[in-house]
Amino acid sequence: MSNNQDWDLETKAIRTGHARSPEMEHSEPIYATSSFCFRSAQEAAARFAGDEPGNIYARFTNPTTRAFEQRLAAMEGAEACVATASGMSAILATCLSLMQHGDHIVSSRSIFGSTTVLFDKYLVRSGIHTSYADQSDIDSWRAAITSKTKLLFVETPSNPLTTLCDIQALANLAHEHGCLLVVDNCFCTPALQKPLELGADIVIHSATKYLDGQGRALGGAVCGSQKLVGEEVFGFLRTAGPTMAPFNAWVFLKGLETLSLRMMAHSASALELAQWLEAHPSIEKVYYPGLPSHPQHELAQRQQKTGGGIVAFEVKGGKDAAWSVIDATQMLSITANLGDAKTTITHPATTTHGRLTDEQREKAGIQQNLVRVAVGLESIEDIKADLALGLDRLK
Ligand SMILES: *Cc1c(COP(=O)(O)O)cnc(C)c1O
């Protein structure tokens, strides 16, 4: 298996994890098989007893999936990685394998919608309760921690307002209280941000987003220590079953090869778009960590390699103005998905955050005039021209 700890991230993204078969294929093969054979009854017994490493059944391991796991682990600087059927099943597996009845989570308030539903509607039924803290306010996290708190959960930058959390400070707080810090690194990916190096215990991914990069497959991953992830999370997954399909693992392997290049290109275009929006007369406010006007610009420069691909902005006017900008676009995709070569545009207040009460939405700072753009890889001039169709009319 090719694996060199000294390689740079860009090399690991292309070379780590491929164990060439005797056929000497150049691109990674897809092992489309649900089970594996043994050379003898003795070998079967040894594998089942765990005395000998090797494949048994695809719910446990699959060589294509393992290649993806090894590659992503190398990129995140993790001892272990387990791939899952989706980002949500990565979060579910982490919570159910590392917590039990009576344990408590403190999460940032502004997290992926389904994660909130998982915490508030389903984990509570297993006696695991969640409290929420303000992303950027460490005192608010400290105040929410109780003697039952086991896990701190954060997304940074947040969706859609790109609020940052100081990962190092939060890791220190977590460890002072004997808690684990879990970071959903979906928005930055290891190409821009390495939470484990900053002290986080576990990194979660929705591979569906930037790791794929072209919106083709659903998947997720959990990265961390051999003890927590290689044993605990893996043990849950091989039993419960939301594992990654080998075809999807192959798609993500291909995605990882270009991840760094893509993240830099998404970021360069996002910065240019953010600057252009900030100067546009129809715009009230722009949210982008790469802008000097972002309240945490200094932290962003320290913690992330670039600002990332997500830009949010408030237009002058209310919901109607926001909707008119979205509806005037001819090229951009009106969809809540992100991390795609295709630029997407969303009205968070009525889609991703539509299920929140007015009060919750107010608290989260999601106004009716807010628009989110996940900047893709089309020409930035064409992206600006498409947004100008609606914005120029607002004046
Ligand atoms: C999409 C997303 C998820 C969930 O991932 P799925 O692959 O859709 O299950 C979790 N966290 C963040 C930040 C996401 O954007």
Image (spheres, helix red, strand yellow):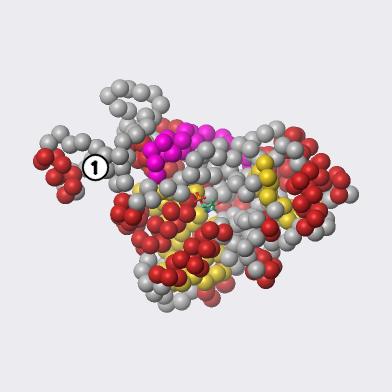
Extent of the magenta region = 244-267
Query: Where, by quadrant of the figure, is residue 341 drawn?
Result: top right
335 lies above or below 14: below
Taking the magenta stretch, the answer to whether it contains residue 197 is no
Residue 273 position (above or below residue 323): above
Question: Which secondary structure lies at badge 1?
Answer: loop
Q: Is residue 274 visible?
A: yes
In the displayed structure, 227 sits above or below 33; it is below
Q: Is residue 273 left or right of residue 45?
A: right
Q: Is residue 131 above or below residue 162?
A: below
In front of the other: 83 or 215: 215
Regarding residue 263, the answer to whether it shows in the image is no
Predominant SS of the magenta segment: helix
For image coordinates 69% across by 59% down, the residue present is 349
User: x, y percentage for residue 336?
Assistant: 62, 49
Residue drawn 41% across the image and 75% down it: 148
The reply, left or right, for residue 137 in relation to residue 217 is right
Quadrant (top left/top right/bottom left/bottom right) for the N terminus: top left
Q: What residue is rendered at 70% in x and 40% in y?
A: 332
**Residue beneath label 1, please?**
56
* Left or right of 249, for residue 372: right
